[in-house]
Image (cartoon, helix red, strand yellow):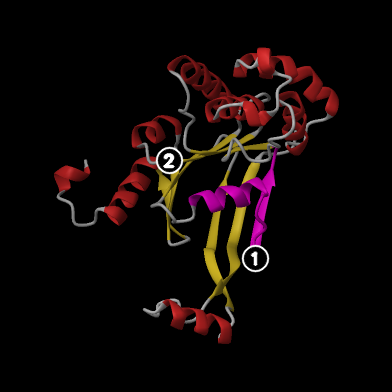
Amino acid sequence: MPQVHIRVRNLKLEVPYFEQAGVRDKSWLATAVGAAFSPPRRRFATLLDDISFDIPRNGRVALLGRNGAGKTTLLRVLAGAFMPTSGRVEVRGSRQALLNLGLGFNAEATIVENIYLRGTAMGMGLSTIRGLVDSILEFAELEEVAGRRLSTLSSGQRMRLGFAISTSVQHDIMLMDEWFGAGDAAFVQKARTRMNDRVAGSRIVVLASHNFQMLRAVCKTGLVLEHGRLVFNGPIKEAIAAYKEIYQPAAPAAARN
């Protein structure tokens, strides 16, 4: 069996954007004239900068950082959705990312057709997907509307469908942006049970969350990001403390416990 691991070396991710001069002019006319005679300039934003770390087999890693620090972006790089501008990312083992459960759906296709679309995007073969359709529909509680277009479902039903598909098979590596907690109480409890099973069966888990209690229960180590840079890598208790120092550096000691 191949060794399951994640290795990241000097990861950098830059994305282009366009900046329009004169956008702060008080007059709308001045802004319009400025836009006409001053075309937007292409700039680059650095989202991740010089990040290196290793996650071995059986790693349980928390991603910590303020909103915009780069947690979701890093997860997307690890999932293969974003290619780094420079550096090296090596991921050994099958992986599944629970980042955007509605991503990749076709609103005009039927629910069953979307199961095939999403399953194919996840790398499943047609025979595998065919064998999972019934169990996915049952878990998502959508058996009676399987032939309807996705556009007829509520946002909660779409979320249940995305979760059921994404967790239908066990993977070596789980990449999660927050723990699933949407839907009615009965479905949330069912989803938590499956999540616990999938986490227990995974060789590596990387979880981004602000829920310290859950992170202490699930994770052994933590990575703390700030402005796209890795500022701490170590035991989960120390990682949480390092993160707290970023967003509440002046808080009294008693408030940080």
Secondary structure of the residue carrying numbered label 2: loop
Q: Nearer the viewer, residue 127 or 113?
A: 113
Q: Which mark is residue 114?
A: none
Give the quarter of the image for residue 84.
Answer: bottom right
Mark closer to the chain start, 2 or 1: 1
Look at label 1 and name its amino acid.
Answer: Thr
> What are the residue bounds of the magenta stretch?
71-94
Residue labelled with disc 1: 85
Left or right: 110 as drawn, with respect to 97: right
Q: Which mark is residue 209?
A: 2
Q: Nearer the viewer, residue 135 or 85?
A: 135
Quarter occupied by the C terminus: top left
Look at label 2 and name its amino acid.
Answer: Ser
Residue 166 visible somewhere in the drawing? no
Left or right: 95 as drawn, with respect to 22: right
Name the residue at 34% across, 50% down: 243
Secondary structure of the residue carrying numbered label 1: loop
Quarter occupied by the N terminus: top right
Query: Where's residue 56, x and y in %?
Result: 58, 42
Residue 45 visible somewhere in the drawing? yes
